[in-house]
Image: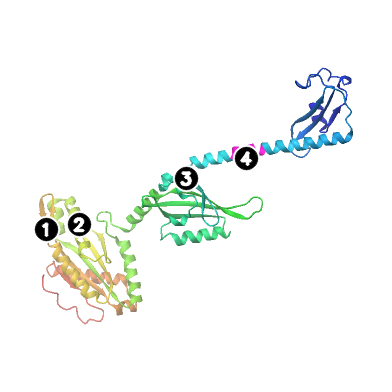
Amino acid sequence: MCARAAACRDVVVVEDVAAEAGLADVAFGPDCPVAGFCAATPLFAGEPEAPLLGTLVLADPMPRVFPPHLKQRLAELGALAAAQLRLEEAARRASAEAALYRLLADHSTDTIVRGDLDGVRLYVSPAVHSLLGYTPEELVGRRAVELVHPQDLPEFQALMRQIREGRIERGRSEQRQRHKNGQWVWIEAFIRLTSDKTTGRRDGYVVSVRDISRRKAAEDHLAHLATHDALTGLANRSRLQERLGEERTRGQRTGTGFAVLCLDLDHFKQVNDAYGHEAGDAVLRSAAIRIQQASREEDLVARLGGDEFIVVLRCCPAPGAAAERLSERLIEMMAQPISYRGASVEVGTSIGIAVASSAMVARGLDLDELLRKGDQALYRAKAFGRNRFIVAPQEDADAPGQPPAPL
Protein backbone atom coordinates (compact mmCIF):
# COMPACT_ATOMS: atom_id res chain seq x y z
CA MET A 1 0.00 0.00 0.00
CA CYS A 2 2.87 2.38 0.79
CA ALA A 3 4.53 1.60 -2.52
CA ARG A 4 1.27 2.09 -4.43
CA ALA A 5 0.58 5.43 -2.74
CA ALA A 6 4.14 6.59 -3.38
CA ALA A 7 4.01 5.51 -7.00
CA CYS A 8 0.77 7.25 -7.84
CA ARG A 9 1.39 10.13 -5.38
CA ASP A 10 -2.31 9.98 -4.43
CA VAL A 11 -4.69 8.25 -2.00
CA VAL A 12 -4.97 4.49 -2.59
CA VAL A 13 -8.04 2.61 -1.21
CA VAL A 14 -8.65 -1.16 -0.94
CA GLU A 15 -12.19 -1.74 0.38
CA ASP A 16 -11.85 -5.57 0.53
CA VAL A 17 -8.33 -6.76 1.23
CA ALA A 18 -9.24 -10.44 0.81
CA ALA A 19 -10.12 -9.79 -2.81
CA GLU A 20 -6.86 -7.94 -3.48
CA ALA A 21 -3.96 -10.07 -4.63
CA GLY A 22 -0.84 -9.68 -2.51
CA LEU A 23 -2.57 -8.10 0.49
CA ALA A 24 -4.34 -11.06 2.08
CA ASP A 25 -3.14 -12.14 5.53
CA VAL A 26 -1.07 -8.96 6.02
CA ALA A 27 -0.99 -7.78 9.62
CA PHE A 28 -1.28 -4.02 10.26
CA GLY A 29 -0.54 -4.13 13.96
CA PRO A 30 -1.69 -5.73 17.23
CA ASP A 31 -5.15 -4.17 16.95
CA CYS A 32 -5.56 -5.30 13.36
CA PRO A 33 -3.77 -8.66 12.86
CA VAL A 34 -5.73 -9.28 9.68
CA ALA A 35 -7.08 -6.36 7.71
CA GLY A 36 -10.30 -6.38 5.73
CA PHE A 37 -9.91 -2.77 4.58
CA CYS A 38 -6.97 -0.40 4.10
CA ALA A 39 -6.27 3.01 2.59
CA ALA A 40 -2.99 4.95 2.22
CA THR A 41 -2.06 8.55 1.43
CA PRO A 42 1.49 9.74 0.71
CA LEU A 43 3.10 12.42 2.87
CA PHE A 44 5.23 14.90 0.93
CA ALA A 45 7.84 17.38 2.13
CA GLY A 46 6.02 20.18 0.30
CA GLU A 47 4.53 20.30 -3.15
CA PRO A 48 3.53 16.96 -4.74
CA GLU A 49 6.86 16.98 -6.62
CA ALA A 50 8.73 17.20 -3.34
CA PRO A 51 10.42 14.18 -1.72
CA LEU A 52 8.25 11.63 0.09
CA LEU A 53 8.30 11.84 3.90
CA GLY A 54 6.29 8.65 4.45
CA THR A 55 2.82 7.18 4.12
CA LEU A 56 -0.27 7.42 6.34
CA VAL A 57 -2.20 4.10 6.33
CA LEU A 58 -5.69 3.37 7.68
CA ALA A 59 -6.73 -0.27 8.28
CA ASP A 60 -9.88 -2.05 9.53
CA PRO A 61 -10.35 -5.79 10.26
CA MET A 62 -13.58 -5.66 8.28
CA PRO A 63 -14.12 -4.62 4.68
CA ARG A 64 -15.87 -1.26 4.32
CA VAL A 65 -17.09 1.13 1.70
CA PHE A 66 -14.92 4.29 1.40
CA PRO A 67 -16.85 6.99 -0.48
CA PRO A 68 -15.04 9.83 -2.33
CA HIS A 69 -15.64 12.43 0.39
CA LEU A 70 -13.79 10.21 2.91
CA LYS A 71 -10.98 9.78 0.42
CA GLN A 72 -10.73 13.59 0.27
CA ARG A 73 -10.74 13.77 4.05
CA LEU A 74 -7.91 11.21 4.18
CA ALA A 75 -5.89 13.31 1.71
CA GLU A 76 -6.44 16.38 3.89
CA LEU A 77 -5.42 14.44 6.98
CA GLY A 78 -2.27 13.32 5.14
CA ALA A 79 -1.49 16.95 4.26
CA LEU A 80 -1.84 17.94 7.93
CA ALA A 81 0.37 15.05 9.01
CA ALA A 82 2.97 16.00 6.41
CA ALA A 83 2.88 19.63 7.58
CA GLN A 84 3.41 18.51 11.15
CA LEU A 85 6.34 16.35 10.12
CA ARG A 86 7.85 19.28 8.23
CA LEU A 87 7.43 21.55 11.26
CA GLU A 88 9.02 19.01 13.55
CA GLU A 89 11.93 18.54 11.13
CA ALA A 90 12.38 22.31 10.79
CA ALA A 91 12.29 22.68 14.58
CA ARG A 92 14.82 19.90 14.94
CA ARG A 93 17.13 21.50 12.38
CA ALA A 94 16.68 24.93 13.96
CA SER A 95 17.44 23.52 17.39
CA ALA A 96 20.53 21.75 16.10
CA GLU A 97 21.61 24.91 14.27
CA ALA A 98 21.04 27.06 17.34
CA ALA A 99 22.98 24.59 19.47
CA LEU A 100 25.83 24.70 16.95
CA TYR A 101 25.86 28.50 16.89
CA ARG A 102 25.78 28.62 20.67
CA LEU A 103 28.62 26.09 20.81
CA LEU A 104 30.69 28.21 18.42
CA ALA A 105 29.91 31.45 20.26
CA ASP A 106 30.51 30.00 23.72
CA HIS A 107 33.85 28.45 22.75
CA SER A 108 35.18 31.12 20.39
CA THR A 109 38.37 32.85 21.49
CA ASP A 110 36.77 36.07 20.22
CA THR A 111 34.04 37.66 22.32
CA ILE A 112 30.68 37.57 20.51
CA VAL A 113 28.08 40.20 21.40
CA ARG A 114 24.47 40.60 20.31
CA GLY A 115 22.92 44.01 20.91
CA ASP A 116 19.80 45.95 20.03
CA LEU A 117 19.67 49.21 18.09
CA ASP A 118 19.99 51.20 21.31
CA GLY A 119 23.36 49.57 21.96
CA VAL A 120 22.11 47.42 24.83
CA ARG A 121 23.80 44.03 25.00
CA LEU A 122 21.42 41.09 24.72
CA TYR A 123 24.05 38.33 24.68
CA VAL A 124 27.76 38.25 25.56
CA SER A 125 29.86 35.13 25.07
CA PRO A 126 31.95 33.68 27.93
CA ALA A 127 35.23 34.79 26.27
CA VAL A 128 34.57 38.28 27.65
CA HIS A 129 35.88 37.12 31.02
CA SER A 130 39.36 36.58 29.57
CA LEU A 131 39.13 39.83 27.63
CA LEU A 132 37.73 42.28 30.20
CA GLY A 133 37.38 40.33 33.45
CA TYR A 134 33.56 40.45 33.53
CA THR A 135 31.12 37.56 33.43
CA PRO A 136 28.55 37.69 30.60
CA GLU A 137 25.79 38.29 33.15
CA GLU A 138 27.54 41.46 34.37
CA LEU A 139 27.43 43.00 30.88
CA VAL A 140 24.08 41.85 29.48
CA GLY A 141 21.60 44.72 29.68
CA ARG A 142 24.37 47.36 29.68
CA ARG A 143 25.68 49.51 26.82
CA ALA A 144 29.12 49.15 25.28
CA VAL A 145 29.77 52.90 25.53
CA GLU A 146 29.95 52.55 29.31
CA LEU A 147 33.37 50.88 29.01
CA VAL A 148 34.89 52.82 26.10
CA HIS A 149 37.83 55.15 26.79
CA PRO A 150 36.75 58.82 26.68
CA GLN A 151 39.24 59.61 23.91
CA ASP A 152 37.86 56.81 21.72
CA LEU A 153 34.21 57.42 22.52
CA PRO A 154 33.31 60.06 19.84
CA GLU A 155 34.57 57.90 16.97
CA PHE A 156 32.84 54.79 18.34
CA GLN A 157 29.55 56.63 18.85
CA ALA A 158 29.70 57.98 15.29
CA LEU A 159 30.22 54.45 13.94
CA MET A 160 27.33 53.02 15.98
CA ARG A 161 25.10 55.88 14.81
CA GLN A 162 25.81 54.95 11.20
CA ILE A 163 25.05 51.28 11.97
CA ARG A 164 21.86 52.14 13.84
CA GLU A 165 20.58 54.41 11.05
CA GLY A 166 21.35 51.81 8.39
CA ARG A 167 23.83 54.03 6.54
CA ILE A 168 26.38 51.23 6.73
CA GLU A 169 25.83 47.52 7.35
CA ARG A 170 29.21 46.71 8.79
CA GLY A 171 32.07 48.54 10.45
CA ARG A 172 35.36 48.10 12.27
CA SER A 173 36.53 49.88 15.39
CA GLU A 174 39.76 49.98 17.40
CA GLN A 175 39.25 51.32 20.90
CA ARG A 176 40.25 50.99 24.52
CA GLN A 177 37.76 49.43 26.91
CA ARG A 178 37.99 49.38 30.68
CA HIS A 179 38.91 46.05 32.25
CA LYS A 180 37.17 45.12 35.49
CA ASN A 181 40.47 45.79 37.30
CA GLY A 182 40.46 49.38 36.00
CA GLN A 183 43.12 48.99 33.31
CA TRP A 184 42.50 49.83 29.65
CA VAL A 185 42.52 47.07 27.04
CA TRP A 186 42.92 47.73 23.32
CA ILE A 187 40.24 45.81 21.41
CA GLU A 188 39.28 45.43 17.77
CA ALA A 189 35.55 45.12 17.06
CA PHE A 190 33.92 43.96 13.82
CA ILE A 191 30.30 45.12 13.85
CA ARG A 192 27.48 44.08 11.53
CA LEU A 193 23.91 45.31 11.33
CA THR A 194 21.17 42.66 11.47
CA SER A 195 17.59 42.70 10.14
CA ASP A 196 14.43 40.71 10.82
CA LYS A 197 14.12 37.98 8.17
CA THR A 198 10.35 38.41 7.93
CA THR A 199 9.94 42.19 7.93
CA GLY A 200 13.39 43.25 6.77
CA ARG A 201 13.48 45.90 9.51
CA ARG A 202 16.76 46.58 11.33
CA ASP A 203 16.74 44.84 14.69
CA GLY A 204 20.22 45.13 16.15
CA TYR A 205 23.84 44.24 15.60
CA VAL A 206 26.34 41.44 16.11
CA VAL A 207 29.94 42.20 17.00
CA SER A 208 33.07 40.08 17.22
CA VAL A 209 35.65 41.48 19.63
CA ARG A 210 39.30 40.52 20.09
CA ASP A 211 42.25 41.72 22.17
CA ILE A 212 44.86 43.67 20.16
CA SER A 213 46.92 44.97 23.08
CA ARG A 214 50.07 43.20 21.91
CA ARG A 215 49.67 44.50 18.39
CA LYS A 216 49.13 48.06 19.58
CA ALA A 217 52.16 47.78 21.87
CA ALA A 218 54.25 46.58 18.91
CA GLU A 219 52.94 49.43 16.75
CA ASP A 220 53.73 51.96 19.48
CA HIS A 221 57.21 50.50 19.86
CA LEU A 222 57.87 50.75 16.11
CA ALA A 223 56.52 54.29 16.06
CA HIS A 224 58.78 55.16 19.00
CA LEU A 225 61.81 53.69 17.23
CA ALA A 226 61.01 55.74 14.13
CA THR A 227 61.12 59.00 16.08
CA HIS A 228 63.53 58.31 18.95
CA ASP A 229 67.20 57.57 19.49
CA ALA A 230 67.84 53.93 20.40
CA LEU A 231 70.69 54.64 22.84
CA THR A 232 69.21 57.45 24.95
CA GLY A 233 65.48 57.28 24.21
CA LEU A 234 65.53 60.96 23.23
CA ALA A 235 63.85 62.30 20.12
CA ASN A 236 65.79 61.78 16.90
CA ARG A 237 66.32 64.04 13.88
CA SER A 238 62.93 63.11 12.38
CA ARG A 239 61.02 64.05 15.52
CA LEU A 240 63.14 67.20 15.89
CA GLN A 241 62.07 68.42 12.44
CA GLU A 242 58.43 67.74 13.31
CA ARG A 243 58.70 69.65 16.58
CA LEU A 244 60.40 72.64 14.95
CA GLY A 245 57.51 72.84 12.50
CA GLU A 246 55.04 72.62 15.36
CA GLU A 247 56.75 75.47 17.22
CA ARG A 248 56.79 77.64 14.11
CA THR A 249 53.05 77.09 13.69
CA ARG A 250 52.42 77.72 17.39
CA GLY A 251 54.46 80.93 17.28
CA GLN A 252 52.54 82.22 14.26
CA ARG A 253 49.28 81.50 16.07
CA THR A 254 50.26 83.02 19.43
CA GLY A 255 52.60 85.80 18.32
CA THR A 256 55.51 84.43 20.36
CA GLY A 257 58.95 83.05 19.57
CA PHE A 258 61.04 80.04 20.58
CA ALA A 259 64.67 79.06 20.88
CA VAL A 260 66.99 76.21 19.98
CA LEU A 261 70.00 75.06 22.02
CA CYS A 262 72.72 73.13 20.18
CA LEU A 263 74.98 71.21 22.60
CA ASP A 264 77.82 68.81 22.48
CA LEU A 265 79.98 67.37 25.24
CA ASP A 266 83.41 68.82 25.89
CA HIS A 267 86.31 66.33 25.73
CA PHE A 268 83.97 63.44 24.87
CA LYS A 269 86.53 61.83 22.55
CA GLN A 270 88.90 61.52 25.48
CA VAL A 271 86.31 59.45 27.33
CA ASN A 272 86.11 56.96 24.47
CA ASP A 273 89.89 56.85 24.16
CA ALA A 274 90.48 56.35 27.89
CA TYR A 275 87.60 54.06 28.87
CA GLY A 276 86.18 52.62 25.65
CA HIS A 277 82.94 53.00 23.76
CA GLU A 278 80.85 51.36 26.48
CA ALA A 279 81.89 54.16 28.80
CA GLY A 280 81.09 56.66 26.06
CA ASP A 281 77.60 55.23 25.72
CA ALA A 282 77.13 55.39 29.51
CA VAL A 283 78.20 59.04 29.51
CA LEU A 284 75.77 59.82 26.66
CA ARG A 285 72.91 58.21 28.55
CA SER A 286 73.77 60.13 31.72
CA ALA A 287 74.04 63.37 29.73
CA ALA A 288 70.63 62.73 28.18
CA ILE A 289 69.11 62.29 31.64
CA ARG A 290 70.69 65.49 32.93
CA ILE A 291 69.55 67.50 29.92
CA GLN A 292 66.00 66.24 30.40
CA GLN A 293 66.10 67.04 34.11
CA ALA A 294 67.28 70.58 33.44
CA SER A 295 64.73 71.20 30.69
CA ARG A 296 61.05 71.87 31.14
CA GLU A 297 58.57 69.10 30.51
CA GLU A 298 57.12 71.00 27.55
CA ASP A 299 60.53 71.34 25.84
CA LEU A 300 61.92 68.76 23.42
CA VAL A 301 65.33 67.13 23.92
CA ALA A 302 66.83 65.34 20.91
CA ARG A 303 70.06 63.52 20.07
CA LEU A 304 71.31 63.83 16.52
CA GLY A 305 74.18 61.37 16.84
CA GLY A 306 77.53 61.15 18.59
CA ASP A 307 77.55 63.69 21.42
CA GLU A 308 75.31 66.20 19.62
CA PHE A 309 72.13 67.20 21.43
CA ILE A 310 69.39 69.71 20.65
CA VAL A 311 66.88 71.31 23.01
CA VAL A 312 63.84 73.06 21.50
CA LEU A 313 62.26 75.49 23.95
CA ARG A 314 58.54 75.80 23.52
CA CYS A 315 57.17 79.17 22.40
CA CYS A 316 57.12 81.78 25.19
CA PRO A 317 57.14 85.59 25.50
CA ALA A 318 60.92 85.80 26.14
CA PRO A 319 62.60 82.77 24.52
CA GLY A 320 66.10 84.27 24.58
CA ALA A 321 66.12 84.81 28.33
CA ALA A 322 64.65 81.34 28.93
CA ALA A 323 67.33 79.78 26.72
CA GLU A 324 70.14 81.53 28.62
CA ARG A 325 68.75 80.39 31.98
CA LEU A 326 68.52 76.83 30.74
CA SER A 327 72.05 76.98 29.33
CA GLU A 328 73.40 78.06 32.72
CA ARG A 329 71.65 75.13 34.41
CA LEU A 330 72.96 72.70 31.80
CA ILE A 331 76.54 73.89 32.12
CA GLU A 332 76.33 73.59 35.89
CA MET A 333 74.80 70.10 35.80
CA MET A 334 77.15 68.76 33.13
CA ALA A 335 80.17 69.95 35.11
CA GLN A 336 79.37 67.35 37.78
CA PRO A 337 81.47 64.14 37.36
CA ILE A 338 79.80 61.03 35.95
CA SER A 339 80.49 57.75 37.71
CA TYR A 340 81.39 54.79 35.50
CA ARG A 341 82.47 51.49 37.08
CA GLY A 342 84.11 53.22 39.99
CA ALA A 343 85.81 55.86 37.86
CA SER A 344 84.89 59.53 37.92
CA VAL A 345 84.45 60.78 34.36
CA GLU A 346 84.41 64.51 33.81
CA VAL A 347 82.90 66.20 30.77
CA GLY A 348 81.40 69.59 30.24
CA THR A 349 79.16 71.07 27.58
CA SER A 350 79.32 73.90 25.07
CA ILE A 351 76.08 75.44 23.88
CA GLY A 352 75.02 77.54 20.92
CA ILE A 353 71.70 79.35 21.19
CA ALA A 354 69.59 80.37 18.19
CA VAL A 355 66.54 82.46 19.01
CA ALA A 356 63.53 82.57 16.69
CA SER A 357 61.92 85.86 17.66
CA SER A 358 58.22 86.47 17.21
CA ALA A 359 59.04 88.79 14.29
CA MET A 360 61.12 86.09 12.59
CA VAL A 361 58.38 83.51 13.09
CA ALA A 362 55.74 85.87 11.72
CA ARG A 363 57.80 86.54 8.57
CA GLY A 364 58.20 82.84 7.89
CA LEU A 365 61.11 81.11 9.55
CA ASP A 366 63.68 78.92 7.75
CA LEU A 367 64.13 76.06 10.22
CA ASP A 368 67.32 74.73 8.63
CA GLU A 369 68.83 78.20 8.84
CA LEU A 370 67.87 78.38 12.52
CA LEU A 371 69.73 75.14 13.23
CA ARG A 372 72.71 76.31 11.20
CA LYS A 373 72.95 79.46 13.34
CA GLY A 374 72.78 77.37 16.49
CA ASP A 375 75.61 75.18 15.22
CA GLN A 376 77.72 78.20 14.37
CA ALA A 377 77.18 79.62 17.85
CA LEU A 378 78.16 76.25 19.33
CA TYR A 379 81.44 76.19 17.37
CA ARG A 380 82.18 79.72 18.57
CA ALA A 381 81.56 78.64 22.17
CA LYS A 382 84.03 75.79 21.76
CA ALA A 383 86.52 78.09 20.06
CA PHE A 384 86.34 80.52 22.99
CA GLY A 385 87.33 77.84 25.50
CA ARG A 386 84.33 75.48 25.86
CA ASN A 387 82.06 75.10 28.91
CA ARG A 388 80.05 78.16 27.97
CA PHE A 389 77.17 79.28 25.77
CA ILE A 390 76.97 81.85 22.99
CA VAL A 391 73.82 83.35 21.49
CA ALA A 392 73.73 83.56 17.71
CA PRO A 393 73.17 87.12 16.43
CA GLN A 394 69.65 88.05 15.39
CA GLU A 395 68.91 88.79 11.74
CA ASP A 396 68.85 92.54 12.35
CA ALA A 397 72.07 92.66 14.44
CA ASP A 398 75.07 94.51 12.96
CA ALA A 399 77.73 92.40 14.57
CA PRO A 400 77.93 89.14 16.57
CA GLY A 401 79.19 90.93 19.68
CA GLN A 402 81.59 89.62 22.29
CA PRO A 403 81.17 86.19 23.83
CA PRO A 404 80.19 85.99 27.45
CA ALA A 405 82.84 85.45 30.08
CA PRO A 406 83.63 81.83 30.98
CA LEU A 407 81.27 80.38 33.59
Foreground of the two, 105 or 84: 84
Asked whether disc 2 touches disc 4, contact meaning CB atoms under 8 Å apart, the reply is no
From the image, tell me which residue sits under label 1: 337
Can you give x and y, in whole percent of width and height, for residue 90 in the image? Answer: 66, 39
SS for callout 4: helix
SS for callout 3: loop
Can you give x and y, in whole percent of width and height, for residue 266 in the image? Answer: 15, 62
SS for callout 1: loop
Which one is closest to the eye, mark 1 or mark 3? 3
Residue 366 position (above or below residue 101):
below
Q: Residues within 10 Å of mark 3 (few under 14, many from 20)?
A: many
Q: Which mark is residue 284?
A: 2
The colour scheme used here is: rainbow
Q: Quadrant of residue 321?
A: bottom left
Quadrant in the picture for the C terminus = bottom left
| N-term mark: 1 or 2 | 2
From the image, tell me which residue sits under label 3: 110
